[in-house]
Amino acid sequence: MLSVRTFHEGKFTEGDAALLGSPGLTWVDVREPDEATLLTLAERYGLHRLAIEDCLHLDQRPKLEEYPGHQFLVLQGFTCAAESLSDVTMHELHFFLGPDWLITVHDKAHAAIDQVAKRLTADPAGTIGRGVDFVAYLLADALVDWNFPLLDRVNDAIDDLEERVFDAGPAPSLMQEALELKRTLVLVRRVLSPQRDVVGLLARRGVPNVQEKTTLYFRDVYDHLVRIYEQLDAARDLVGNVVDAYLSVVANRTADVSKQLTIFATLFLPLSFVVGFFGQNFEHLSQPVYFWLMLSLMVVMPATMFWWFRRKEWL
């Protein structure tokens, strides 16, 4: 699906492929790209063949490449519409940035793109009228900002895990949730870490097709990515603390059970000795006095040991 938005002499126009080649500033958005559509755009705007191949295989690393007449930019973001945080969706957005045109290519719908499109429709002069590089900034900023709700959900999930580990006690499901959170954090961090460097390049002066005044806005996107990176590191440490706490609780519970079993075994140890001693087959041990002595010892010794354990606070 291809949509075209143009701004020329104060007039904003929105339509389909029929607007390609119209004068003025142009934003072409391609969703679920196919080779024929991309080849048509490549012929019209002089897109490089290598960049077209990257767009046909949406599994690229965040990067910024310069080709004759345009810049090729790859950015990524994450959303999670499912209840489980292990089911995150990665969105990859490709940019072709020319002097007066911008082409975006993506496979999935994303609220960030719809958000920028509505803003262009509401205020074309204050958005695309400031240059197509400013539209690229708006898209990058919205794509990055949509990562914050995901991180908020991760932090809430970590807090909930900590409470359940100490309140409800350890359970295998808690460890599974912690490991799922850790995998999600590793995935997001692995993707957004190089993206921070890519946006940092756009925040510098001298990048072709990016105005100097727009670099200030990309600097703000870079700051957001730095915050996200710091939150990812903090969340990863917190997940590690939850796992350590879970293992500590399990170890304490195991130690407590072992202590109780050891105490029971210790209580019955002297009883086994008494029964074994007085159960010997000797004539003088069969007299009534020894029988009552054995019964007394079987009562007094465990009671004394129990009192001693309580005094030592072992029970």
Image (spheres, rainbow, N blue to C red):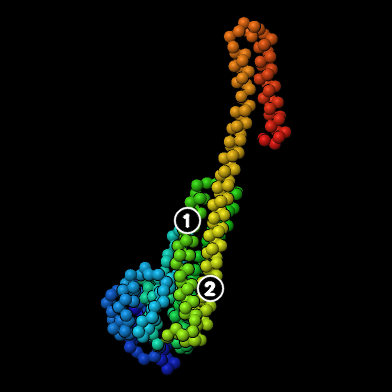
Residue 305 visible in the current orientation: yes
Query: Which mark is drawn over residue 180?
Result: 1
Total of numbered circles in the picture? 2
Choose top left, top right, bottom left or bottom right for residue 15. bottom left
The quarter of the image holding the C terminus is: top right
Residue 309, placed above or below residue 51:
above
Q: Which residue is mark 2?
A: 224
Choose top left, top right, bottom left or bottom right for residue 8. bottom left
Residue 161 visible in the current orientation: no
Q: Is 204 in front, or is 189?
A: 204
Q: Residue at x 33, y 88 (%)?
A: 21
Task: Label 1, secondary structure: give it.
Answer: helix
Residue 310, placed above or below residue 29:
above
Q: Residue at x 44, y 80 (%)?
A: 136
Residue 309, placed above or below residue 96:
above
Q: Amino acid at mark 2?
A: His
- Give the CA distance from mark 1 to mark 2: 25 Å
Choose top left, top right, bottom left or bottom right for residue 139. bottom left
Residue lying farthest to the top in this orientation: 283
Q: Amino acid at mark 1?
A: Glu
The quarter of the image holding the N terminus is: bottom left
* Sequence-earlier tag: 1 or 2: 1
Q: Is residue 64 left or right of residue 39?
A: right
Q: How crowded is the residue under tag 2: few (<14 C-alpha within 10 Å), some, or many (20+)?
A: some
Query: What x and y, as percent, mark residue 244?
Result: 56, 51
Query: What x and y, as percent, mark residue 252?
Result: 59, 43
